[in-house]
Amino acid sequence: MNVYDFDGTIYRGDSTKDFYLHCLRHNPRMLAQVPANGVDCVQFALHRLARQDFKERFMRRLLSRVEASRMVASFWQTHRGRLQEWYLEQRDAGDLVISASPQFLLQPLCDELGVSLIATNVDPATGAFLGPNMRGEEKVRAFGEAYPHTTPAAFYSDSMSDAPMMRLAEQAFLVRGTKITPVDRHALS
């Protein structure tokens, strides 16, 4: 099994940010949220707001103004082209995407691609987090829970924040756009 991070790895950019901008373009009344989101961004940058709290506040505001399923469908109609060509060429039905992005956002695309998904469980009606943010060690925990006694053949990510998953896999690759570089196992210690 090959396992892939999503944002910045097989998707060019940050899908959650792009989804927000997509929603903003299609729902201008969301502009009223910009000041509150800005304050939260500053609080997060100053380490006065935890990552999961920051993301949950953001999701609650966003989903209070949009119908998630309709916006997700329209988002993937316009953003599917941001998938990396190298991934589409090597994609396999046994692949797993593991991401901190919301499950409701990625699930339709992963279903279309025919690959499995583990992502942050966010209620698409309210924006409430129904579980932990799927980041760092949490990816390893969730992977082990879903696939006990399984070692990924390869793990691909654009970020060393995924070092815990890189250590778990037989091979690890760092992705920078279309450049894919093997990660030195000794550098992960």
Image: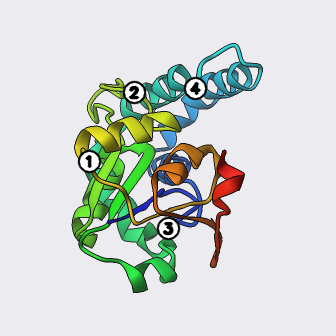
Label 2 vs 1, first from the N-terminus: 2
Q: Which mark is residue 149?
A: 1
Residue 73 % position (x, y)? 29, 59
Crowding near pointer 4: few (<14 within 10 Å), some, many (20+)? few
Image coords of residue 89 (percent x, y): 41, 86
Report the residue marked by disc 4.
Answer: 51
Task: Give the total of numbered labels.
Answer: 4
- Which quadrant of the figure has residue 152? bottom left
What residue would you read off at disc 3? 10
Question: Mark 2 or mark 3: which comes first in sequence?
Answer: 3
| 2 or 4: mark nearer the eye | 2
Crowd class of label 2 (few under 14; some 14 to 19; many from 20; radius 10 Å): some
Residue at figure coordinates x 63%, y 58% from the top left: 185
Q: Say the numbered circle drawn on residue 12.
A: none
Q: Nearer the viewer, mark 2 or mark 1?
A: 1
Local SS, label 1: loop
Residue type at mark 1? His
Judged left or right of residue 176, residue 105 is left
Q: Earlier in the sequence, mark 1 or mark 3?
A: 3
Kindly state the secondary structure of the residue where label 2 is placed: loop
Q: Does residue 121 appear left or right of residue 134 in this picture?
A: left
In the picture of the structure, the residue carrying the numbered disc 2 is 132
Image coordinates of residue 4 in percent, x first then y, are 44, 61
Judging depth in this view, the residue of 172 and 124 nearest the camera is: 172
Does the residue at mark 3 contact the one at mark 4 (Cβ under 8 Å)?
no
